[in-house]
Image (tube, rainbow, N blue to C red):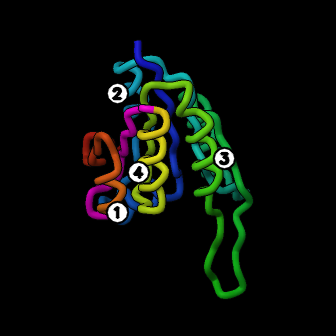
Amino acid sequence: MKKIAIFVDVQNIYYTTRDAYGRQFNYRKLWQLIAAQGEITCATAYATQRSDDQQTRFHDALKHIGFTLKLKPYIQRSDGSAKGDWDVGITIDVLETAKEVDIVILLSGDGDFDLLLKKAITKYGVSAEVYGVPSLTARSLMDAASIYHPIDAGLLL
């Protein structure tokens, strides 16, 4: 049975599915699809921490499905923009985990992860799969992936 690790860039998936489809991503459906392919040995969702009930319920739902949640404080800048980037944390965790699994699955459309996937594939020989919204996923990330899975209506609530 293949060992699988899942890494979710929660903010990226939230905004891309909202912007492209006006709907939310179905994490339970994703879990069922991936669990049918092998043993999920690690599943981490990276998100920002805000103090509102809706987000707390969402985080609890992710934990209930089986995800480990890693949170960073939500920082609102004086110019109105926000910060809560997990790119470095995701990168470190993928590289530390890739040596222990057969498949690394990344949910993100962020092209900054293309080098990460190339490194994981060449150094550890893993299959690196990406789930992302086609119109909002960087071409470089799609190209770096062993397999690209477009997020479409079948993975939405």
From this viewpoint, which residue is outermost toward the front? 123
Residue at image point 36% right, 56% down: 141
Instruction: Residue type at mark 4: give it.
Output: Gln
Instruction: Residue type at mark 2: give it.
Output: Leu
Q: Which mark is residue 138?
A: 1
Secondary element under disc 4, as helix, strand or loop, is loop
Q: Is residue 89 left or right of residue 106?
A: right
Secondary element under disc 1, as helix, strand or loop, is loop
Residue at image point 47% right, 46% down: 119
> Which one is in front, 50 or 71?
71
Instruction: Residue type at mark 1: give it.
Output: Ala
Instruction: Residue type at mark 3: give it.
Output: Thr
Q: Quadrant of the C terminus?
A: top left
x then y, percent, for residue 129:
36, 40
Q: Nearer the viewer, mark 1 or mark 4?
A: 1
List the residue tagged with mark 2: 33
Mark 1 vs 4, N-terminal side: 4
List the residue tagged with mark 4: 24
Q: Are marks 3 and 1 in contact (CB under 8 Å)?
A: no
Q: Nearer the viewer, mark 3 or mark 1?
A: 1
List the residue tagged with mark 3: 56
Kindly report the distance in space between the C-alpha atoms of the residues bearing marks 3 and 1: 30 Å
Kindly report the distance in space between the C-alpha atoms of the residues bearing marks 2 and 3: 25 Å
